[in-house]
Image (tube, coloured by chain):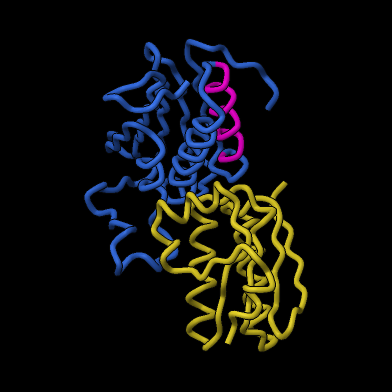
Chain colours: A yellow, B blue
Amino acid sequence: MTIKANTRQVDGVTVVDLSGRITLGEGSTILRDTVRELLGRGQKKILVNLGDVNYIDSSGIGELVSGYTTVTNQGGQLKLLNLTKKVRDLLQITKLITVFDIFDEETAAVRSFT
Amino acid sequence: MKKAMPSTGRVEVRLESSLESVDLAEEMARRFAQAAGFSEEDLDKIGMSVREGLVNAVHHGNKYDTHKRAGLRLEMEGPNLVVTVTDQGSGFELAGVPNPLASENLLKQTGRGIFLMRAFMDEVEVRRLSPTGTEVRMTKHAVPTNGKEEQR
């Protein structure tokens, strides 16, 4: 299975529920397209739920970073929710854990958006 | 791929320069390493390293050229797993690969493949092939070394 993305609105924040693998090809493309589509609709508060993502390769990491910089450059915020151990370890190794705002609880994550 | 892998010996394939080959190579490596007795955690590390190697080979090296092939060799050298990935691209200098952990590179979209291979495998060597191409040779130790935690 590659990846599925569903979006929902919670108190003005768009939560993107991802499931599957974010890897080079369809996985990273879906993530990129989802972020672009949200920005195109003016939705700049984006919470990416990675709870059902158990695999990300370097291309997937690159797409997360690209999404983060794109949203930030447009005056928005992109944050991460519910990292699995594998994904958290990857972000730790790549030092990106210091870049992203990461939450384990959705309500607190939604409330953190300004 | 469902074919059983030998726990020792060697598997060598030449793959099309496609994303399907990346998935296939990862699966082959995981099965080979599993048959050799590596832990689940190591299988993840080996699988991802092979994936990154194949992505480099078919994407950056061969640029999806249908006339070029990516090579994958899996073999046990004593207790160690040795993975060799080759491409037929124009090659690159390892010294020219920027450090993805440097603050100026942290937000770059690309450039983490070799870094992850080095993080997950015990040895990674890159060399240019003649007349063209690149070979990446990765080794995963199956026994404790230098007092490191046991891995299998």
Q: Is residue A28 magenta?
A: no
Viewer-proximal residue among A37 and B33: B33
**Quadrant housing residue B32:** top right
Task: Say above or below: A34 vs B3.
Answer: below
Picture quarter with the C terminus of chain A? bottom right
**Residue B32 on the magenta segment:** yes
On screen, A8 above or below B114?
A: below
Residue B120 is situated, as x and y percent measured from the top left of the image, at: 41, 38
Q: Which is the main secondary structure of the residues drawn in magenta?
A: helix
B49 lies above or below B141: below
Residue found 52% across the figure and 50% down from its top: A57
- Quadrant location of residue B35? top right
User: Residue drawn at (50%, 40%), measured in percent from left and top?
Assistant: B48
Q: Is residue B82 above or below residue B115?
A: above
| Residue span colored magenta | B22-35
A30 to the left or right of B83: right
Write the residue at 33% across / 65% down: B105
Closer to the camera in the image, B3 or B145 = B145
For the residue pair B80 and B55, the one nearer the viewer reads as B80
Question: How far across and how far down the image is residue B51, in percent?
Answer: 51, 40
User: Residue at the spot x=69%, y=53% of the render?
Assistant: A52
